[in-house]
Image (spheres, grey):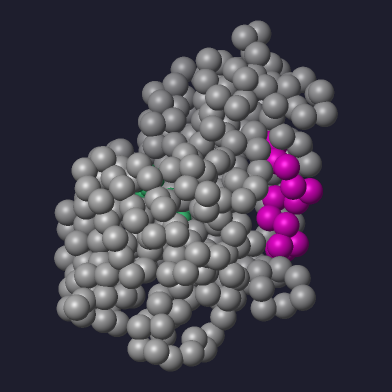
Amino acid sequence: MKFRVTVLGAGFGGLELSTLLSEALGDRLDLTLIDQHDSFYFGFSKLDVMFGHQQADAVKIPYRHINKPGVKFRQEKVTSIDPNTRKVTTDKAEYESDILVVALGANYDIAATPGLTQFGNEYYSFEGAEKLRDILPSFKQGHAVVGVCGAPFKCPPAPSEGALMLHDYLVERGLRDACTISLVIPFGLPIPPSPDSSKALLKAFEERNIRFIPQRKISSVTADKKVLLDDGTELPCDLLLGIPKHVAPPVVLESGLAENGWIPVERANLRTKYPGVYAIGDVTSVGTPKAGVFAEGAAVYAAKSIIADYHGKEEAAAYTGAGSCYIEFGKGTVARVDVDFFSGPKPSGIHQEASADLVADKKLFGSSRKARWFGF
Ligand SMILES: Cc1cc2nc3c(=O)[nH]c(=O)nc-3n(C[C@H](O)[C@H](O)[C@H](O)COP(=O)(O)OP(=O)(O)OC[C@H]3O[C@@H](n4cnc5c(N)ncnc54)[C@H](O)[C@@H]3O)c2cc1C
């Protein structure tokens, strides 16, 4: 009998895990990879779409290209998960398996921030980024706020990237002097584990006259063009690029897998407390930021554990929480921070200065994943 694995969610985590199990077990594997959508896109593509650097269709990679031994993709919506029996129900079928991997990512609770839908905008969903792409050309003067509404949130550098890219967008259109930009984030520094990356970002904000407002969140947006921060401060706001509050998908919350909003896992191997059930990526509370590189890293260690179990061996290595994040610095440059969350006594990050070379590095990061997961 083949080894039956069900992977819920075909994002960074689910795609990498399915690839690794296929490479290790080939036709001995009977893996079903389920996602509600018909295509994958990188999180950073939303910035490209919002600022009109890429067409929405050009950044989507259809799942129909997945062609790996032992793996079949199903476009279905997961409607219930029973972690005790590992039984999964979707809008089309039911699945039972030896191993269940939950990689369903994080959703957005846009309504949790009063006024965000009616009077503001967000660029974390694909639809939100597309909407902003159409709104941005009408912003010609006033105060723009790039701001976070809740923590944790995906890709901690992305708010800083949004502010720097907005600066470039306005400069290119000759509008920068008519506009002010503020950046609101809930941390003391733009990238807490890396003082050097934070220093470089703060310098870039200063050079570009972007006001950095640390340790704050946006709590509401009003009809009279204001955002209210969590300490009661009011900011005028003619354009809001918001980062909405994040939540686990409803099907995860209903399954009983989550505690305090996210799925707890053993840090070393990403096992949940339910036998044969793993969780990886943004849906967990493993202790790394919510980012694709960490979802991918977690997939590697979950796969090691699943393969070791299959062969009846002890698992060797433990997840290190390491990953490299690229940071759009604007002006055609990209920086990089190599972060390690679990190896040392505290998280650390090594900064690589923004350069044109790292633009090529980031492109390679994307194209190598596309080749590995989709075969082209
Ligand atoms: C603006 C922006 C920029 C970013 N830049 C970067 C970056 O430069 N580097 C980086 O590493 N990360 C970046 N990220 C973060 C990154 O996109 C996520 O952290 C990453 O995708 C998480 O991977 P995951 O596998 O946990 O979940 P996801 O990739 O979100 O995948 C989860 C999948 O589950 C599916 N799903 C959810 N619920 C259901 C259901 N009920 N039924 C069926 N399918 C379901 C979803 O459709 C989705 O495809 C960025 C994010 C944003 C918003």
Q: Give the range drawn in magenta.
A: 183-196
Instruction: Determine whether 114 is above or below 358 in the image.
Output: above
- Expressed as whole percent of the image width and height from the top left, the position of residue 138 reads 46, 17
- Expressed as whole percent of the image width and height from the top left, the position of residue 320 reads 59, 76
Give the image quarter of residue 194.
bottom right
Which image quarter is the C terminus in?
A: bottom left
Q: Can residue 331 be seen by looking at this rendering? A: no
- Expressed as whole percent of the image width and height from the top left, the position of residue 37 reads 28, 43
- From the viewer's perspective, is 62 left or right of 180? left
**Closer to the camera in the image, 84 or 223:** 84
Q: Residue at x 27, y 56 (%)?
A: 95
Identify the residue at the far bottom of this view.
313
**Closer to the camera in the image, 106 or 168:** 106
- Expressed as whole percent of the image width and height from the top left, the position of residue 290 reads 56, 54
Give the image quarter of residue 30.
bottom left
Q: Residue at x 76, y 36 (%)?
A: 216
